[in-house]
Amino acid sequence: MDTKYPRRILAKIRAHFEDEQKHLEKRLGQIDESDPYKDPDHANDNADIGLDVREEIAHQQSEGNRDQLKKRLSEVNDALERIDKETYGFCTGCGKMIDTDRLSSNPLASLCIKCANSN
Ligand SMILES: [Zn+2]
């Protein structure tokens, strides 16, 4: 590889991802706490249908959010791993450098535009 990202820039990107990683882990923890199904006292066989429905909706919302956050967190972890391996910024498909415009609009991108489009 002829061009590598300067360490100074990688350090900045890494710090940014580490922040996001912490933030996502915190959010995931909060979602676990707010999920009514995690609450041992949550309404079981409750006569109040309305409460059951509200709990079901809250549960599904937190499941949806959790899936999204988990997906994002694993992408952030992958990017951090690529920084450690010094492969960050290179396409995991073809090994070429990812266009910097693409990377600045989506720092988590692991594929160049060509490979992303052929997937
Ligand atoms: Zn590629």
Image: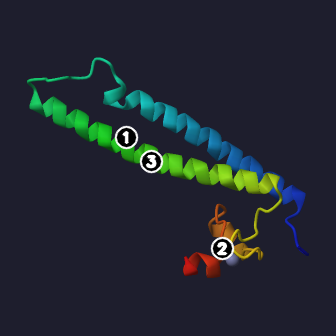
- The answer to whether residue 43 is left or right of residue 109 is left
The picture places residue 113, in percent across and down from the top left corner, at 63, 79
Local SS, label 2:
helix
| Location of mark 1 (residue) | 62
User: Image point 56% across, 80% down: which residue?
Assistant: 117
Residue that carries the numbered disc 3 in the rendered image? 67
First of labels 1, 3 by sequence position: 1
User: Whole-percent x and y of residue 6?
Assistant: 88, 62
Q: CA distance from mark 2 to mark 1?
A: 31 Å
Relative to 19, is 72 on the left or the right? left
Task: Describe the element under mark 3 as helix, strand or loop.
Answer: helix
At a point 17% along the width and 30% down the height, the residue shown is 51
Q: Residue at x 63, y 46 (%)?
A: 20
**Residue at x 59%, y 50% (from the top left corner):** 74
> Which residue is denoted by mark 2 in the rendering?
102
- Lateral position of residue 115 relative to residue 47, left or right: right
Q: Contact (CB < 8 A) between labels 3 and 2?
A: no
User: Residue 104 location in percent, x, y?
Assistant: 68, 68
CB at mark 3 closer than 8 A to ligand 1?
A: no
Front of the two marks 3 and 2: 3
For label 1, the SS is helix
